[in-house]
Image (tube, rainbow, N blue to C red):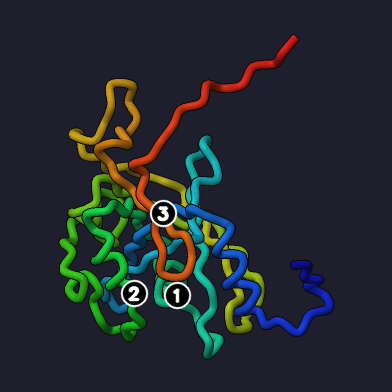
Amino acid sequence: MYIDLGDTDKTWQDIYKLIVTFVNPRPIALVSTISADGVRNLAPFSFFNMVSANPPVMMVCPSRKRDHGKKDTHANIQATGEFVVATVTRSIADAMNDSSAPYPPDVDEFEKCALTPMPASIVRPPLVAESPVNCECKIDRIIEFGDQPGAGAVIFGRIVAIHAKDEFISDDGGMDPEKLQTIGRLGRNSYATTTDRFDLPRAQIRI
């Protein structure tokens, strides 16, 4: 297969469906926000990652809806400047999936998905009590790539606080992957767990 994106009859949806099946596994962020009217929102994003260590910065990438509008997460972060990223594990996979339903902006997804909101320390959006790790973030900047359906935006958030449950932390100060049991998105309806792992030592220059 060869696709010249400047000369193809494929739609953006065709290209999207292809790319998300080979850019994987993708970590999943469960993003908590609050609207300008005070309504809690919760939504999953597999277009998500860490982008800077110093300062610590995360990114989430919402896309435009089919009516050109912004998703609730995008609109809420723009309005309030704050959000929380919760780590998605196998134990809350079903609730994460439930939160992806296109609820109206006045619906509280915490209630719909049977997840427990907990007060954050610095930002207004709540933590997800069932998640082993929650990162409180304040907006750094937003880069948008258009306003057409499917156009993405990159929301960069500076991490201002981290809540990590002690029982998941290893002796080296990191999280124990065996206990954490995160999942990744593969495309279509497929997900992956992290139960099959292997180690590789950091490569050294060969002389």
Front residue of this view, candidates 21 and 43? 21
Measure the alpha-carbon separation of dots 3 and 1: 25 Å
Nearest to the eye among marks 2 and 3: give it. Answer: 3
Q: Residue furthest right?
A: 7
Percent x, y of residue 14: 63, 78
User: Residue 117's quadrant in the figure?
Assistant: bottom left
Is residue 136 visible to us here?
A: no
Residue 42 x %, y %: 31, 68
Disc 2 to disc 3, C-alpha distance: 28 Å
Q: Residue at the far front: name it.
A: 1
Residue furthest top as drawn: 207
User: Of callouts 2 and 3, which one flags the residue occurring earlier in the amino acid sequence?
Assistant: 2
Q: What residue is pinned by disc 3? A: 184
- Asked if the residue at tag 3 contacts the one at tag 2, i.e. Cβ–Cβ closer than 8 Å, the answer is no
Amino acid at dot 1: Ala
Q: Do the residues labelled 2 and 1 touch (CB within 8 Å)?
A: yes
Residue placed most toward the observer, 179 or 68: 179
Q: Residue at x 52, y 61 (%)?
A: 155
State which tag comes first along the sequence, 3 or 1. Answer: 1
Q: Residue furthest bottom?
A: 67
Look at the numbered discs 3 and 1 and tell me whether their residues touch, using CB distance below 8 Å.
Answer: no
Q: SS of the residue at dot 3?
A: strand
* Disc on res. 35: 2
* 138 is higher (above) or lower (below) than 167: below
The quadrant in which residue 130 appears is bottom left
Residue found 49% across the figure and 50% down from its top: 49
- Kindly identify the amino acid type of the residue bearing the numbered disc 2: Ser
User: In x, y percent, where is residue 151?
Assistant: 61, 75
Label 1 sits on residue: 75
Q: Residues within 10 Å of mark 1 (few under 14, many from 20)?
A: some
Packing grade of label 3 (10 A; few <14, some 14-19, many >=20) is many
Disc 2, SS: loop
